[in-house]
Image: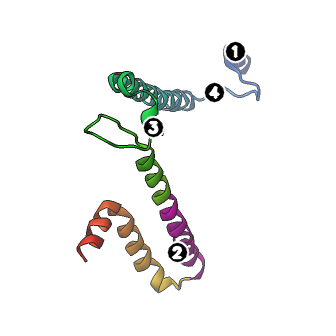
Amino acid sequence: MERDAQALAAPVLRRHGRIPNIGDTLFRGAAMMAGLSVLLVVGLMLYELVDKSRLSLDKFGIGFLTGTTWDPVDEVFGAAPAIYGTLVSAGIALLVALPISIGAAIFLAEMAPSWLRNPLSFVVEMLAAIPSVVYGLWALMF
């Protein structure tokens, strides 16, 4: 009886001599499909971006990204200052936020007393749940 089971399982044996579990096989396939679908969606987004911007690329060329003059009257458009400003402000935000976030994580995980850990981690999670645009608008108002 045991020999018959081994004979039936022989074609599906793996390197380690185990019969693969059907649940593991299905999960592996589902995970692979999910990963590939992310790549497919990113590819479709890139295609749409290029396809829908074809008219502006034909008219203004790639110089739109490197030009520094923005003159709508003469139809001269350069986005380099806006791109540079976005990158610099994002970099400054990271320089400010990174030490604070790492310090808060270390404090909550290692140093905070147990009576303070739960309420403070709840407050940090609530702050993280609010979009940063809301904080910016709040800062403008006050």
**In front: 40, or 10?**
40
Q: Nearer the viewer, residue 35 or 127?
A: 127
Q: Earlier in the sequence, mark 1 or mark 3?
A: 1
* Residue under the image location 50 percent in, 27 percent down: 36
Q: Quickly name the residue at label 2.
A: 104
Q: How crowded is the residue under tag 1: few (<14 C-alpha within 10 Å), some, or many (20+)?
A: few
Label 1 secondary element: helix
**Residue 4 badge:** 1
What secondary structure is marked by label 3?
helix
Q: Is residue 125 found left or right of 99 in the rendered image?
A: left
Q: Is 86 in front, or is 71?
A: 71
Residue toward you, 77 or 88: 77
CA gap, disc 1 and disc 3: 69 Å
Q: Please give the range of residues in magenta.
A: 91-111
Q: Nearer the viewer, mark 3 or mark 4?
A: 3
The amino acid at mark 2 is Ala
Residue 129 position by quadrant: bottom left
Q: The C terminus lies in which quarter of the figure?
A: bottom left
Question: Disc 3 to disc 4, how far (Cα)?
Answer: 53 Å
Q: Residues within 10 Å of mark 3 (few under 14, many from 20)?
A: some
